[in-house]
Image: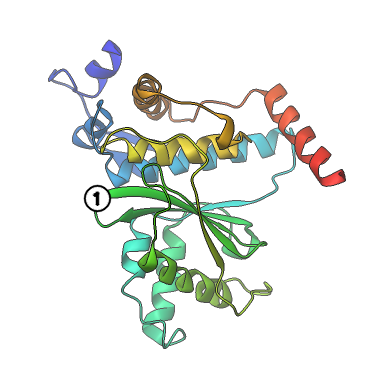
Amino acid sequence: MEAIRTDWGWGGLPGSGPIQHDLMWTLDTDVMQSLEPKGWLDDRIIYAYMWLLRDREEVIAAAGVYPRKPLYYFMEPLFMELAKKVDYSHPYFAKTMHFFLTWVSYGVGPPINQLDYIFVPANVNQNHWTPMVFFVKEWGVMVLDPMNYNAKYPEEEECWSCCRYMLHYVGKNKNVPDEEPLFHVWDAMPKQDNYSDCGVYVCKYMNYTLQGYDLAKVRWDASDVEIFRYRIAMEFQRGMAKPIPTHHMRQMMERVAGKNSS
């Protein structure tokens, strides 16, 4: 903790500078300070963390531990807010198609016509981070709200029209249904107990999901979330997400194979 305070200026020490990673993102000191306990995460933290998760997926695939399936895609955190302003009554107008192409290029992951899941961090009402997961093959959207129970997201639900049209337009040779995707808010996972940790929960939901954890069975408390903040900061310093142990990945794949066979 003391090293992190020194490296990123949390203790007000001179000489701390930005963290850069493969020219994909830069985190200045003021952005890193949003990882302080009780801090409200800057959207650039969430975006950069998605890059770390994407890089880890590539490393696992290259090592041959398991085939890189399903394929994950991470949408830029500002996407959902701007998607609310798109005119879906004319989805194939030049302006709308330009929006599709622009924001697909800002995402993190494989070509969109190869993916199975889209992770979308959404800033609900400009004051609360909530991750949404688009299950492309199942044609459904799962909302993982770290705070509210039985909440409704009418504007966000409308925004998935954008993803539907985007897949139609950009996902060449992909069988995309015409109907709206099924929208479901899921509450069986750890929840925050304050108004500042939502961004941390977004990062950890994505991280734990990619590791194969059942979020309904994990338990976090306030001390865990504070540790998560420092761990995320350390992962940024190292330029890589915490590796998944090989034995854990094999166990995960064995569980998946068992469910499929049954």
- Residue under the point 47% across and 74% down: 161
63 or 112, nearer to the observer: 112
From the viewer's perspective, tell me whether residue 243 is left or right of residue 84.
right
The amino acid type found where label 1 is placed reads Asn
In the rendered image, the quadrant that contains the N terminus is top left
Residue 171: image x %, image y %?
60, 71
Q: Residue furthest front?
A: 150
Residue 64: image x %, image y %?
74, 35
Label 1 CA crowd tier, 10 Å (few <14, some 14–19, many 20+):
few
Q: Report whether residue 23 is seen.
A: no
- Residue under the point 34% across and 70% down: 84
36 or 47, nearer to the observer: 36
Residue 34: image x %, image y %?
24, 34
Can you say whether 33 is above or below 161 in the image?
Answer: above
From the viewer's perspective, tell me whether residue 231 is left or right of residue 133.
left
195 or 101, nearer to the observer: 195
From the viewer's perspective, tell me whether residue 223 is left or right of residue 115.
left
Q: Which residue is mark 1?
A: 127
